[in-house]
């Protein structure tokens, strides 16, 4: 198995204020770090500049929650990946289930956003996951496999792409699949990537689990063979919880 650096990514979603962001980052900056573990924070776009300035001298990486496929143009309210790179971002989350649901983003949209992220020299965190109805119908692997195939661009490499599996029914609910279920999906994702990109890329590409990962279950989930980190929602808003998850890696 290729050595893969664990990525612990915090998706703040539409949460924070200036004061909250400062306090949260102050807490994260006290974390001494851990070999083989990379920490990433993805605040809402209004706070990317201030948060980026606070972490600029640290090992914490900065990410955004979405981007527009185009580099510029008449797209009011949207943000280009090139702008995010200019602010010091290293990653962009694309295709989160909340974007797919709230904004009607399709696999084709996510594919275009991931390509834009690569164009700007950033790494894309491509999100996939099934609904509860799809899981109950036994369609999980088919749904997730199709999302990966249609959302991940042909130019994906282990350096510029991360895939995050987030079962929609587990996000923010406190419910999580069993470890066996998580590993089954992650193994299937890696198998599909191997068929498309070859063993070297697939073995090096990091696969994150998201969906109610917290300090109490992080060690068990992060110990799974094909889980290379977490995309953390609610628990990323408390420095103590977020760093505890990072400490559970490895």
Image (cartoon, rainbow, N blue to C red):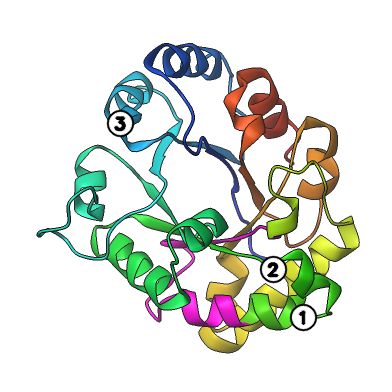
Question: Marks 1 and 2: CB-CB under 8 Å?
Answer: yes
Q: Which residue is found at the position 40% from the left and 73% from the top?
A: 111
**Element on which disc 3 rests:** helix
Q: Which residue is found at the position 87% from the left and 56% from the top?
A: 179
List x then y, in percent, for residue 246.
67, 33
Q: Which residue is found at the position 71% from the left and 60% from the top?
A: 167
Q: In this view, does 152 lie to the left or right of 237?
A: left
Query: Does 219 sit above or below residue 146?
Result: above
Q: Is residue 73 left or right of residue 50?
A: left
Please give the count of numbered marks on the rendered protein. 3
Q: Earlier in the sequence, mark 1 or mark 2?
A: 2
List x then y, in percent, for residue 121.
27, 57
10 Å neighbourhood of mark 2: few (<14), some, or many (≥20)? many
List x then y, in percent, for residue 165.
65, 61
User: In this view of the protein, which residue sits in the foreground, 146 or 119?
Assistant: 146
Q: Quadrant of residue 239?
A: top right
Q: Earlier in the sequence, mark 2 or mark 3?
A: 3
Q: Residue 46 carries which label?
A: 3
Residue behind mark 1: 139
User: In this view of the protein, which residue sits in the foreground, 198 or 138?
Assistant: 138
Query: Does 122 sit above or below residue 130?
Result: above
Boundaries of the magenta span = 146-167
10 Å neighbourhood of mark 3: few (<14), some, or many (≥20)? few
10 Å neighbourhood of mark 1: few (<14), some, or many (≥20)? some
Q: Quadrant of residue 132?
A: bottom right
Q: Which residue is found at the position 57% from the left and 65% from the top?
A: 204
**Element on which disc 1 rests:** loop
**Element on which disc 2 rests:** loop
Residue behind mark 2: 130
């Amino acid at each position: 198995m290729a050595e893969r650096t664990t990525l612990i990514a915090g998706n703040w979603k539409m949460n924070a204020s200036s004061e909250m962001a400062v306090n949260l980052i102050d807490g994260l900056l006290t974390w001494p770090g851990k070999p083989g573990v990379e920490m990433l924070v993805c605040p809402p776009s209004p706070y990317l500049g201030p948060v980026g300035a606070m972490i600029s001298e640290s090992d914490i990486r900065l990410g955004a929650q979405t981007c527009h496929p185009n580099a510029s143009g008449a797209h009011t309210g949207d943000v280009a990946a090139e702008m995010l790179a200019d602010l010091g971002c290293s990653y962009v989350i694309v295709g989160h289930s909340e974007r797919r649901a709230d904004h009607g983003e399709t696999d084709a949209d996510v594919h275009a956003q991931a390509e834009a992220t690569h164009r700007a020299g950033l790494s894309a965190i491509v999100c996939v996951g099934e609904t509860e109805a799809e899981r109950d119908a036994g369609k999980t692997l088919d749904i997730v496999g199709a999302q990966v195939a249609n959302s991940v661009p042909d130019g994906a490499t282990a350096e510029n792409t991360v895939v995050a599996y987030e079962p929609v029914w587990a996000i923010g609910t406190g419910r999580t699949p069993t470890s066996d279920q998580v590993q089954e999906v992650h193994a299937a994702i890696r198998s599909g990537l191997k068929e498309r990109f070859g063993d070297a890329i697939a073995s090096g590409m990091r696969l994150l689990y998201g969906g109610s990962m917290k300090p109490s279950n992080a060690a068990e989930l992060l110990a799974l063979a094909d889980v290379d980190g977490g995309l953390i929602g609610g628990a990323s808003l408390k420095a103590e919880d977020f760093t505890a998850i990072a400490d559970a890696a490895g």
